[in-house]
Image (cartoon, grey):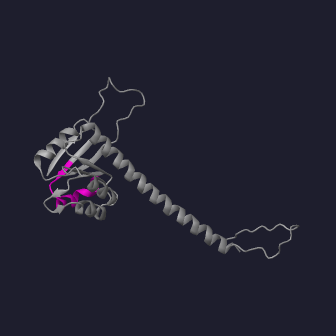
Amino acid sequence: MDRAEVVFEDSPGTATAGSQAPPLIDVLLVEDDDGDALIVQELLLEAAVRVERARSLAETRPRLAAASCVLLDLGLPDSRGLDGVRWLQEQAPGVAVVVLTGVADERLGAAAVRAGAQDYLVKGNVDGTLLHRVIRYAVERRQAEKMQIELSLAQAVARENARVARGLLPSPLIADPRLTVATRYLPGGGQ
């Protein structure tokens, strides 16, 4: 279990009024190659992230709850190709997944995004700024997706509540424009 934590705080002389540090992002790096893992951790040294490493999908299970984003290699001891992306979608659908692999294949990248990954990056073609931006945007997109789902559920509940209310209120029996119909509800037990 490798853990690299990088947290930067403004020194007292550099803080400006109203400035806030960006929120810390918890990243789970799933990479079996020590050299590649070290490079990724070095790339993220200047970013506001906390990086924890797992060498296989089996090692990720207890750590998924704390992760905001998973950087996933596609060649792991217990997973090949897009199986890891699919597994993560089943195990932790709320976690952003960014594929970071050595395979430069546009079709595989598109397939990874269709399988649920937020982005697809090729090792060696990434610098620290790009990697941090991709992680941040992936987390934001995943949060926006969750909020959209919650909004859709709330709208469905509101529609159902309106339908039930329409069914409970009486309909006017007389359609005379000289009359005004007003309905009101008095709860039972008020005598």
Q: Quadrant of residue 10?
A: top left
Q: Is residue 174 above or below residue 48?
A: below
Give the residue at x 62% y 67%: 162
Give the residue at x 34% y 58%: 94
Question: Foreground: 124 or 69?
Answer: 124
Q: Is residue 156 above or below residue 142?
A: below
Question: Foreground: 35 or 184?
Answer: 35
Question: Foreground: 132 or 111?
Answer: 111
Q: Is residue 63 magenta?
A: yes
Instruction: Name the residue furthest right.
Output: 178
In this picture, residue 122 sits left or right of residue 187: left
- Do we see residue 188 in this rendering? no
Q: What percent of the width, then of the height, locates residue 56?
A: 16, 58
Q: What percent of the width, then of the height, locates residue 23?
A: 34, 41
Give the residue at x 24% y 38%: 127
Instruction: Name the residue furthest top.
Output: 13
Q: What percent of the width, then of the height, locates residue 139?
A: 35, 49
In this picture, residue 81 sits left or right of residue 35: right
Q: Which residues are magenta?
A: 52-67
